[in-house]
Image (cartoon, grey):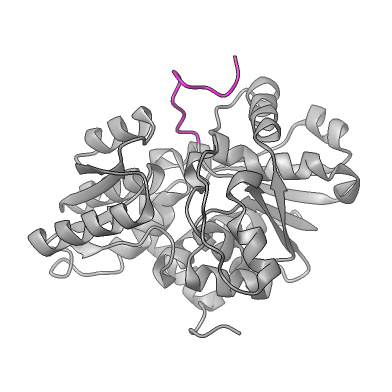
Amino acid sequence: MIMHPIPTASDIQLAHDRILPHIHNTPILTSQFINDLTGAHLFFKCENFQKTGSFKMRGASNVIFSLNSKERLNGFATHSSGNHAQAVAYACKTAGVSAYIVMPKNAPKVKVDAVKNYGGRILFCEPNETARQEACAEVIQETNALFIPPFDDINIITGQATCAKELIDAHIGLDYLLTPVGGGGLASGTALSVKHFSPRTEVILGEPEIVNDTYLSLKAGKIIPVTKTNTIADGLKTTVGKLNFEIIQKYVKEVIPVSEEEISCAMRMIWERMKIIIEPSCAVPFAALLNQKAFFKDKKVGIILTGGNVDMGNLPFE
């Protein structure tokens, strides 16, 4: 049972109107080779071409530009392994305010460098949730900045929901829509857009086997925290958020766990066959589809390619 009012179709439309000046309506690509290989009709929503290189720009922009200039005056703070950090830094730069970013010390160099280039002020911490939250709380106390949660927030969820809305607006008539799941901002937002704008479509999530907290949580009926984080999908190492989980419980069909090898192979296939750069986390839903090809045969399937911020010196394949 959902304990909070969930965003309506009007809320998602309002968020989309608000952020349109600050984002790209990213392209939807297809591949005949991949269609032939899978037996399905796939439509890839390419958020790797989004500003800052990931869908996270949508949620961050929605939070920041929903506030007036006085409310934004002291800037914003957050903690993130990379893509949310970049989005907050860039959106703050666009709004002309400060961004204070707590990042784990093992965050990919490409993402750290991008945050710096966008003017974000970085504080490094140990790579665990407690350290992130404590460091961020210290920054907020010192600066009076407003906190932007990475995923467990209505305005973040509503902003991320706009990605699926754009895919649905293309009038493809999808049978399924796949996303990865980490904290659950995109997953829950996608589920809400499907509920409001394409109720015949079902949402399926992909998740690394090593960090399969959402899969286990759905089975248990309660949130099971992450205990291992040694996955190549660096954006999916976080325990699913409370609000996100409530929405996922109600509106997501299932979660398909995939191995590290499956993630790497899926990532490589998209690089080689579609000639575009995606990051490991981005490959997870495609890996889930490859894992269950018979299930998706002859279906129209949307896949959100969540980002393309890759550490070129640390690829999971040669």
Residue visible at 8% across and 60% down?
A: 142
Residue 289 sits inside the magenta stretch: no
Q: Tell me the quarter of the image containing the C terminus.
A: top right
Does residue 206 appear anywhere in the picture? Answer: yes
**In this view, which residue lies farthest toward the top?**
318
Q: Looking at this view, is 20 or 228 the one in front?
A: 228
Q: In this view, does 57 lie to the left or right of 47?
A: left
With respect to residue 184, does 85 lie above or below?
above
Q: Position of residue 75 (x, y in %)?
A: 16, 58
Total marks in image: 0
Magenta stretch, overall SS: loop
Q: Is residue 3 left or right of residue 214?
A: left
Q: Give the range drawn in magenta.
A: 308-318
Residue 114 vs residue 247: left or right? left
Of all residues shown, which one is farthest toward the front?
A: 227
Residue 231 appears in which quarter of the rendering?
A: top right
